[in-house]
Image (cartoon, rainbow, N blue to C red):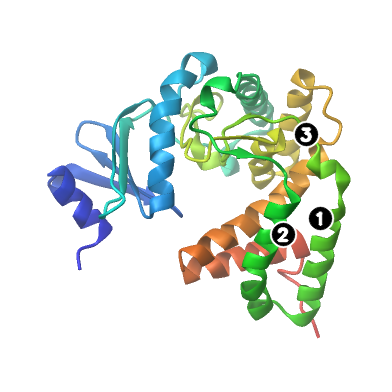
Amino acid sequence: MKSLFETTLLHLKLDKKDVKFIGEGFGSLVLEDQYGIIIRVAKNLDTAKQYVKEYNILPQLQAKLFPINIPIPKWYHYDTEKVPYGIIAYEKLAGPTLIPKVISEENKKRIAKQLAAFIALIHQTPTDHFKDYCPQEENDRNQLTNLRENTYDALSTNLLKKEMLMMNDWWEDMLQDQTFYSHKSVLCHGDLWYENILVNHQQTDITGIIDFSEVKIGDPAIDLVPHHYIGEDFYSYVLNEYRTAFPNDPTIDERVKKHRCLRELNGLAYAIKHNVDVEIQDSIAKIRDVILGTQKKEFK
């Protein structure tokens, strides 16, 4: 059976020597052709549907997010019947991805300020023109109850008994927290992971933001979550800058902390749905670390 990479080359009539493999994530295989065109290939139907969303949304967002560059799709392919289910292509944006380990303290503050300004821009964008393509995701108890049920078996199989009791306590607190379910909905990038942030070679300025596959209308706290992974100091810089644009959201920090936990649980649900064992184990490790704080502890 041909691999997804080989099937894609046949579909696009490309020679292997003319294509560079860039990498892959949960949902996409990423390639670059000899003309500097980035080609993302969906590994499943869910991701293929996201490409259709990006194709329709990104051209409308371009002017609103200036001066930060975003990818503008040149074409896309979508077919629910055969692999590859979806492909999207756009010209490569300039700049390497952000590398947290090499940013100086001074540059952290500079980049955090630019990033907060970008987040403010997208959150201030009117949502009316995007409702036909963007999912609207409220912080909803029923959806979270489903997430709890969908991840229960995997967690109970992999966690220690004491950890599972802690997990159940966390869920009870989560579902009862009234403040989490009250927020203004905005247009969100949805996955502002540092690998989706492009900078100049000096790592002093943001040049572009990529991968809008998770764009949605929802809680603005979602776009602040990934900055914890660069460091708590960086997150604090972004949060403080963001609050100058949105001073009337007093619970955003608490919602960010909860969404950080939910990010790992949703990652587990995705891995379960697509039956990727290595991703299931990776998600379990992250849940132990982020939610339970037991990754480096031993239970007797």
Residue occupying image coordinates x 28% and y 47%: 79
Residue 282 location, x and y as percent?
A: 56, 65
Q: Is residue 164 left or right of residue 71?
A: right
Disc 1 element: helix
Q: Earlier in the sequence, mark 2 or mark 1?
A: 2
Are the residues at dot 2 and dot 1 in contact (C-beta closer than 8 Å)?
A: yes
Observer-side mark, 3 or 2, equals 2
Identify the element where label 2 is drawn: helix
- In the image, which disc is placed on residue 183? 3
Q: Position of residue 137 (x, y in %)?
A: 64, 41
Asked whether 49 or 225 is in front, the reply is 49
Task: State the residue position of label 1.
Answer: 175
Quadrant position of residue 96: top left
Q: Is residue 198 above or below residue 99?
A: above
Closer to the N terminus: mark 3 or mark 2?
2
Residue that appears at 48% across and 35% down: 212
Q: Residues within 10 Å of mark 3 (few under 14, many from 20)?
A: some
Q: In terms of secondary structure, where does tag 3 sit?
A: loop
Tell whether label 1 touches label 3 (CB within 8 Å): no
The quadrant holding residue 300 is bottom right
What amino acid type is highlighted by mark number 3?
A: His
Measured along the vertical axis of the image, is residue 300 above or below residue 87? below
**Tally of marks:** 3
Residues at discs 3 and 2 in contact (Cβ within 8 Å): no
Q: Which residue is mark 2?
A: 145
Nearest the camera: 158 or 77?
Answer: 77
